[in-house]
Image (tube, grey):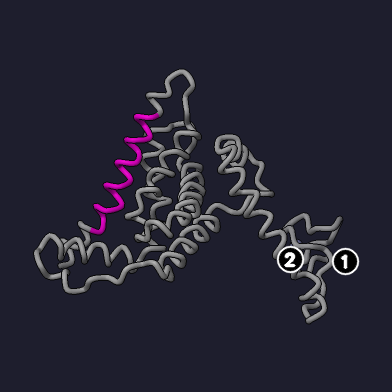
Amino acid sequence: METCLNCGEPLKGAFCHVCGQKASTRQINWKTFLEDLPRSIFNLERGFWYTSKELTLRTRSALDGYLSGKRVSFFKPIQYAILGITLYTLLQAYNPLDPPVVEGLREENELYGMGYAVGKLIGDNLKFYWLLGIFLYALPAKLLFRKYNFTEHMVICAYVLGHSALLASLSIPFLSVPIMFNPFIYLLIGIIYFRLFKDPVNPLGTFGAVIGHLFMCVIMYFGLPIVYYYVFN
Ligand SMILES: [Zn+2]
């Protein structure tokens, strides 16, 4: 009997029923590599476009569907977040319209020095911070929008951060600032949360919760580095 080359389980069907690896595993050489290439790229791209389209047009049914188990067509949440922030960061870093940073300003006064140091701290660890945001932003989200459990809120956060970073990267030609200073990011996060949790009976209540959530996120996002700065300086 044929066994799975990944986990050794006896095979039945086109995929291993234990680990999910394809039953027909071919040797990797130029021929099989080139044959598999278009499908790998196409599948990745299809998952990406499907995810961004669904998150834009059908925010609620897309996320609700994902959380209730319709997952195979979606780009994975953390990967989506990493892709969004990477794209934004790259576009912003290599934007030819970006004016040069005025270095001389930094020691003028203490507040500016602190702001500069904190800004630099966030900037240098941007991806880490943005990914930390997945955890951080899920805390007030769980508090304000009770519907899902905490880990489900982290998944929502990952998609929201990834998607708002992708959409906000369209603003870079007009507004080339690091992601955490881009007001569109916060606007987009707010809009996505509003669409996801909109209570048709009490939309004003949802609006209040969205504003509260954004406020707490910003406090945590900028507060933590400030605390870090004061503790370690
Ligand atoms: Zn297997």
Highlighted magenta segment, given as a residue range? 207-225
Q: Is residue 133 magenta?
A: no
Q: Residue furthest left?
A: 109
Instruction: Determine the main secondary structure of the stretch shown in magenta.
Output: helix
Viewer-proximal residue, 50 or 219?
A: 50
Q: Is residue 143 above or below residue 34?
A: above
Q: Which mark is residue 2?
A: 1
Viewer-proximal residue, 27 or 117?
A: 117
Crowdedness of circle 1 by 10 Å Cα count: few (<14), some, many (20+)?
Answer: few
Locate residue 202: give its quadrant: top left
Viewer-proximal residue, 160 or 174?
A: 174
Q: Residue furthest right?
A: 1
Dot placed on the residue nearer the N-terminal end, 2 or 1: 1
Locate residue 69: give its quadrant: top right
For badge 2, the amino acid type reads Cys
Element under disc 2: loop
Specify whether 118 is left or right of 19.
left
Q: Residue at x 41, y 37 (%)?
A: 142
Q: Which mark is residue 32?
A: none
Q: How many marks?
A: 2
* Image position, residue 50 (x, y; %): 65, 49
User: Is disc 2's CB within 8 Å of ligand 1?
Assistant: yes
Q: Quadrant of the C terminus?
A: bottom left
